């Protein structure tokens, strides 16, 4: 079964008019180049990658997000969501 994505965040991003979202993709050993190529074929822009740990950060068009977990070589997908932390008050 392919990994899932936080669809609530993606739906909100789409509602807010975003054309794409940033995904953090974990890649199986030896599959880095294939996953990066598959992401580019979906129209994604690879922003960062580290084959030593099997990681790709990519800006993916909203309409293609659901395809990412099904790509061969993908082990996990997370949305790079902003964290709204407040500074502690004294």
Image (cartoon, rainbow, N blue to C red):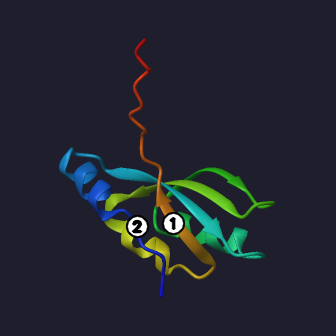
Badge 1 density bin: few <14, some 14–19, many ≥20, Cα 10 Å: many
What x and y, as percent, mark residue 31? Answer: 71, 75
Q: Nearer the viewer, residue 89 or 84?
A: 89
Which residue is rendered at x = 24% and y = 58% of the image?
A: 11
Image: 84 above or below 79: above
What x and y, as percent, mark residue 69? Answer: 48, 75
Work out how far the residue at label 1 is from the one at label 2, CA to CA, in angstroms: 6 Å
What x and y, as percent, mark residue 55? Answer: 67, 59
Q: Name the residue under label 1.
A: 77
Numbered tag placed on residue 19 in the rendering: none
* Outermost residue toward the front in this view: 90
Quadrant (top left/top right/bottom left/bottom right) for the C terminus:
top left
What x and y, as percent, mark residue 86? Answer: 40, 25
* Outermost residue toward the top in this view: 90
Q: Name the residue under label 2.
A: 5
Query: Mark 1 touching mark 2, by CB under 8 A?
Result: yes
Q: Which of 73 and 81 is in front in this view?
A: 81
SS type, badge 2: loop
* Outermost residue toward the left in this view: 15
Give the tally of numbered discs: 2
Image: 35 above or below 8: below
Which badge, 1 or 2, is on the more N-terminal residue? 2
Q: Which of 49 and 45 is in front in this view?
A: 49
* Outermost residue toward the bottom in this view: 1
């Amino acid at each position: 079964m392919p990994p899932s994505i936080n669809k609530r965040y993606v739906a909100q991003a789409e509602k807010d008019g975003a054309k794409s979202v940033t995904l953090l993709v974990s890649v199986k050993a030896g599959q880095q180049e294939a996953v990066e190529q598959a992401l580019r074929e979906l129209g994604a822009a690879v922003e960062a990658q580290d084959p030593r740990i099997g990681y790709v950060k990519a800006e993916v068009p909203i309409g293609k997000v659901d395809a990412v977990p099904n790509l061969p070589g993908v082990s996990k997908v997370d949305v790079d969501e902003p964290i709204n932390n407040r500074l502690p008050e004294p």
